[in-house]
Amino acid sequence: MLILNTFTKKFECLCKREHINIIRRLLSENQWIKRKMPNENIPPHRSDPVIKTLDSPEFKSIFTPELNTLADIFKRHNYELRVAGGAVRDILMGKHPKDLDFATTATPVEMKEMFTKEEVRMINCNGEKHGTITSRINDKENFEVTTLRVDVVTDGRHADVLFTTDWLLDASRRDLTINSMFLDVDGKVYDYFYGYDDLMKRRVAFVGEPAQRICEDFLRIFRYFRFYGRIADVPDNHDEKTITAIKENVKGLEIISGERIWSEWSKILAGNFHRELTLKLIECGCSKYMGLPENLNLEHFNKICLNAQKNNVKLRPITLIAALLRTEEEVLQLFMRLRFPNFDRNLALFIVQHREEKLCENPLKPFQRVVLKTIGKVSDVREFVSELLRYKGSLDLLEEFEKWDSRFPINGGMVKPYVENPKVIGEVINRLKDIWLDSNCEMPVEKLQKHIPDIAAEASLEHKERVEKFKADKEKRRREKKKSVSN
């Protein structure tokens, strides 16, 4: 753990310095900064965007008493309110949307005045600078409503925006056609950029020129692949113009935070075609900016993905990534770039450390030992072992392991009466665990307790000898130091 902490601190310093150097270089080159006029280069679009009116169960399911109240408020104050983005896409696909995002012609100031007049509580004021006001209706449901916007200046990560009342301009700034649609409370679907057509064709396409959309926010490279996994029905039917734009602009990923990359990549790995899409990301040159090493273990990655698919096993995103890596150092380097949770870091390290171990005569015993001897959370280590067995395709052993009750029947209170020094208790319990393991974890507590006196006496004696030796060595060093000073 000390080695890991030291390694982590060194990498943090390196990463901070490198990130500062990247930003300075890009600012000096004035690279990736794009200034636009609101009506500049709007892609081909429908003059009449209303393509259909919905009356489906999925559409009706979004209406709660609180949403009806919100819609009535906007209507009374003569502001338009529409569902935006992903929820529209999901409803059109026959899915119940998990989250609802709303767009409006009202500015943040106008929304605040309106909600204040209607005595509606507003929460989370952080979004106001981006045009978002969050209202809480009937103290039951929160609604995020964002003013229509147009990007004026983009730098590959952020955008300076102007508020507008033009729905076409707002739609034109969105990343993908399937995410650029709106839906009003009467069920009318507004589709300026043929997103519904693409959805029906299971096609993922940028709004307008792919290169322009990517340069506005380089994370859109990952969003493209994530939505491809959600929408497409075949693994490799990419538009060549889109792939070319990604390859030509992949360098922009170096200014994107690791957390944002991990958020998108982990969703790709949890979705359809995760093997093919990860290989496509690597082919496009993204791996360098994701924290991956040059010499990736692609053969092993393919093998693990295909075996999991064959066995109908769902592996965690970090487990799939571990299949690409060869050493623990590569895991830590990736962690320093992507900043994924410590649980995922430790799981990846565990996979890399133990995946080559051969199964012995009692194949469950080494894993039981790891769980029983851990100084961390037992639940985490149990999951590490389970995931490793899924990774190796040892499903029969996995079933046996998950049935195993890892609760050790002896506790410190049972050992305490037999030792003078409480520091010995842990050592006694560890030795008792070895005995229990040798019995295939079947020895009853009564028999284990009979071993306590002898083990406690032996451990106490060894502890006393270690303490006396430490004191003697310390005294010897003190005398030698005193002697060298006097000479």
Image (spheres, rainbow, N blue to C red):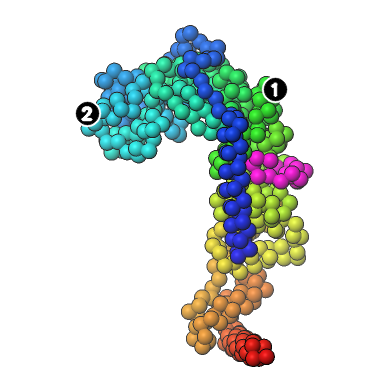
Amino acid type, callout 1? Glu
The quarter holding residue 264 reads top right
Along the line of sight, the residue nearer the viewer: 257 or 437:
257
Asked if one can make out residue 242 in the rendered structure from this viewpoint, the answer is yes
**SS state under label 2:** helix
The residue beneath circle 1 is 240
Image quadrant where one finds the N terminus: bottom right
The stretch in magenta equals 288-305
Image quadrant where one finds the C terminus: bottom right
| Image coordinates for residue 450, horizontal then vertical, percent | 58, 84
CA distance separating discs 2 and 1 = 53 Å
| Image coordinates for residue 188, horizontal then vertical, percent | 42, 16
The quarter holding residue 82 reads top left
Amino acid type, callout 2? Lys
| Image coordinates for residue 355, horizontal then vertical, percent | 72, 55
Answer whether residue 424 is magenta in the image: no
**SS state under label 1:** helix
Residue furthest front in the image: 487
| Image coordinates for residue 135, horizontal then vertical, percent | 32, 34
Answer whether residue 301 is magenta in the image: yes
The residue beneath circle 2 is 117
Q: Identify which residue is drawn at 65% across, 51% down.
A: 333
Left or right of 244? Residue 148 is left
Asked if one can make out residue 465 in the rendered structure from this viewpoint, the answer is no
Counting residues from the N terminus, which is met first, the one under dot 2 or under dot 1? 2
Along the line of sight, the residue nearer the viewer: 258 or 189:
258
Q: Identify which residue is drawn at 56% across, 54% down.
A: 342
In the figure, 268 relative to 368: above or below?
above
